[in-house]
Image (cartoon, rainbow, N blue to C red):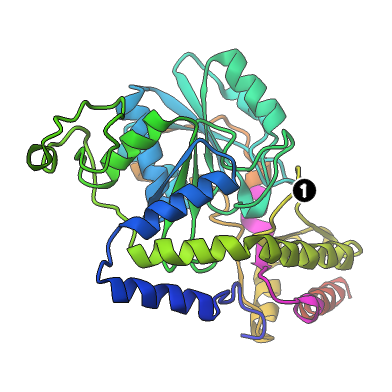
Amino acid sequence: MKYPLACDTWDDREIEAIQKVIKSGRYTMGPHVKQFEKEFARHFMCKDAVMVNSGSTANLLMLATLAEKYKLRGNIIAPAVSWSTTYFPLHQYNFTINFVDIDKHTLNIDPEKVEAAINPETCAIFAVNLLGNCCEYKKLKEIAKRRGLMLIEDNCESLGSITDTQEHAGTVGQLGSYSFFFSHHLQTMEGGMIACKNNDDADFIRSMRAHGWCRDLPDDNKIYKKSGDKFKDSFTFIAPGYSVRPLEMSGAIGSVQLEKWPEMRKKRVKNAEYFKEKFKDLPVTTQKEIGSSSWFGFSIVLEDKLAGHRDVVVKDLESKGVECRPIVAGNFMKNPVIEYLSFLSNGDYKNADYIHENGLFVGNDVRDLKENIDLVYGIIKNTHDRLRS
């Protein structure tokens, strides 16, 4: 591909970090993971952070915390456009998904639609920051506070974004998830993180992360009073857990990637500035920035003569070596898996439906992408001119 969705951001520093772990002889979760958690919490100014083996797992343990620790029941509001593992943990913990339409320009949940969708059984809002762009948190925080709802965040695509409340995306809600998969902002092979508002939530998640035992909890935790007998505490189970620990190598790589992140973010933003300027005269809608985006990728919503011709545009892009994807999963309610899920429909999903049929995105990364962006622009312009003639 001339223009892939993502590129490798590693250099000799990541390889050296892996070699240190290999020499240590400890490959599963250990001191490097703990160090990365502390560095991450400090960098993004959250109370505590817990690393797991994926962003999807991070969402799972967040919903487990709501169901098991906070005993929440009922329906949870979520945008109609997101990744599958935003929704599956809701199903797995018997929450009804209360689907709300998105704003066509931001691609994120529409706060006015959120307000209208709340009912007596609503217990939380699951905000998703899509493609590097933040939700309108000034409005969402006010709604959640006024209506007595828990606010959590799926921030897997938006590490490093700053919200309209001047907070780091992923740290606004009670809990927030991050992904470190290859195509994401930080790359640790596989891996994810949960940002927590308090140590108690973090400790509960640490227990669930490793079988539900108390072994990894600090002695002064408030979740469970340990006996002080290492033999007994090693196999004492206190929460309904999983085995979703990260590798020690992923933690070591995470520390290196985090150190490089400020410069990587600058390069992503620079690419985005060029993309926005380049595409402003084409009949497409590009993502409206809320706060300061970290630009996971560049969304393109086809308008005018291009509308209804996404298949043609995608074929033209792919034939020229440009890798592209739908805007996440489009309107998730149109996916066949929906028959397995318990959900509420609020009737109007015109924006989610429109991007389901007319939306796509191309990648962003830390290289200078001017030539790649020019290539995409030229292809789509030629396609538009051909369709218009």
Tell me, yes or no, if residue 81 can be seen here. no
The answer to whether residue 372 is magenta is yes
Residue at x 55% of width, y 32% of height:
173
**Coordinates of residue 68 in the picture (x, y in percent):** 30, 28
The correct choice, above or below, for 85 with respect to 370 in the image is above
Residue 19 x/y as whole percent: 38, 78
Which residue shows up at 77% across the image and 48% down it?
289
- Placement of the C terminus among the 4 image quadrants: bottom right
219 or 107: nearer the viewer = 219
Q: Is residue 241 left or right of residue 304?
A: left
- The amino acid at mark 1 is Glu
Q: Nearer the viewer, residue 185 or 79?
A: 185
Q: Residues within 10 Å of mark 1 (few under 14, many from 20)?
A: some
Which residues make up the magenta segment? 353-374
In the shown orientation, is residue 175 left or right of residue 262?
left
- Relative to 346, say whether 20 is above or below: below
Q: Nearer the viewer, residue 246 or 88?
A: 246
Residue 243, given in percent of the width and then of the height, sits at 24, 51
**Image position, residue 21 (x, y; %):** 34, 71
Residue matched to label 1: 289
Query: Can you name the residue that lies furthest to the right here?
Result: 281
In the image: residue 203, left or right of residue 320: left
**Compared with residue 247, is residue 136 higher up or lower down, i.e. above or below?**
above
Give the number of callouts.
1
